[in-house]
């Protein structure tokens, strides 16, 4: 990857990207409330398990397919995988999260004028834009290699989960960085798994996480929107 693509990837993966990622915990806050995550060890178990069993088996493979679809200017594939991802959001919070973040990133990328007209038309043809669709669009527009974009997405997801733990377990900053560093092999494995799954192998089956998300919707005291 050349230096320009690397810098573009760092910008897309940056926590300062104004898409609102910091305001979501993706069910983790409910797990904290339930006592399932309570220290550094349990935080690592939670993040690693969610990464391997949920993100690597659905969100990441969908992003991989959307990267290829945008790169090929394949309107049918962009539409299909966008719709599949939205249909798989099984709680109101999870659906609202991805639509809000996808809208924000899509709007930002449009205002930055990073894409040609044909690529932009593919994005604007979607009635609702989830985060993987907007991220794939931006990565292709900025000519970030697919493998790097996938790793960037996985790292950003893991980093956000670690930041939730730093704020809410709470963990110290050193513990948070130690936790993030320990997830390197898990992130690499998740990327490899996501690239190798066939369409019929994709699954977001995680009933425990779905129940926690539903409980979070009515949780009395909370910092995050999901």
Image (tube, helix red, strand yellow):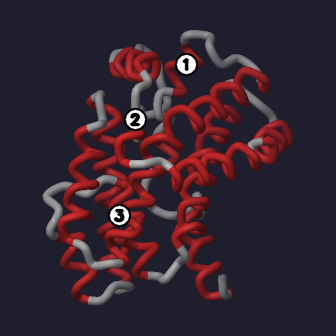
First of labels 3, 2 by sequence position: 3
- Per the rendering, the mark at residue 31 is 1
Image quarter for residue 165? top right
User: What residue is at 70 percent from the left and 35 percent from the top?
Assistant: 166
Of 161 and 155, which appears nearest the observer? 155
User: What residue is at 19 percent from the left and 78 percent from the top?
Assistant: 121
Vertical placement of residue 214 versus 140, above or below: above
Please provide percent x and percent y for residue 167. Answer: 66, 34
Q: Nearer the viewer, mark 3 or mark 2?
A: 2
SS class, disc 2 = loop
Please provide percent x and percent y for residue 136. Answer: 40, 66
Q: Are marks 3 and 1 in contact (CB under 8 Å)?
A: no
Q: Residues within 10 Å of mark 2 (few under 14, many from 20)?
A: some
Q: Quadrant of the C terminus?
A: top left
* Left or right relative to 40: residue 203: left
- Per the rendering, the mark at residue 203 is 2
Q: Which residue is mark 3?
A: 134
């Amino acid at each position: 990857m050349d230096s320009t693509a690397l810098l573009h990837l760092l910008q897309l993966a940056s926590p300062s990207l104004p898409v609102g990622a910091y305001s979501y915990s993706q069910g983790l806050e409910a797990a904290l409330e339930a006592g399932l995550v309570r220290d550094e060890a349990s935080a690592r178990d939670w993040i690693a398990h969610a990464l391997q069993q949920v993100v690597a088996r659905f969100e990441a493979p969908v992003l991989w397919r959307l990267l290829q679809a945008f790169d090929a200017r394949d309107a049918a594939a962009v539409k299909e995988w966008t719709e599949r991802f939205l249909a798989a959001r099984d709680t109101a919070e999870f659906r609202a999260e991805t639509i809000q973040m996808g809208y924000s990133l899509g709007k930002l990328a449009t205002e930055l004028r990073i894409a040609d007209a044909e690529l932009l038309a593919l994005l604007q043809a979607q009635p609702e834009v989830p985060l993987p669709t907007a991220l794939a669009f931006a990565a292709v527009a900025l000519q970030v290699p697919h493998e790097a974009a996938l790793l960037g997405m996985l790292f950003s997801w893991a980093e956000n989960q670690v930041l939730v733990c730093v704020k809410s377990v709470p963990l110290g900053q050193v513990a948070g960085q130690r936790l993030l560093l320990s997830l390197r092999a898990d992130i690499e494995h998740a990327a490899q798994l996501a690239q190798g799954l066939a369409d019929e192998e994709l699954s977001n089956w995680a009933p425990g996480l779905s129940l926690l998300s539903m409980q979070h919707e009515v949780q009395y005291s909370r910092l995050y929107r999901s």
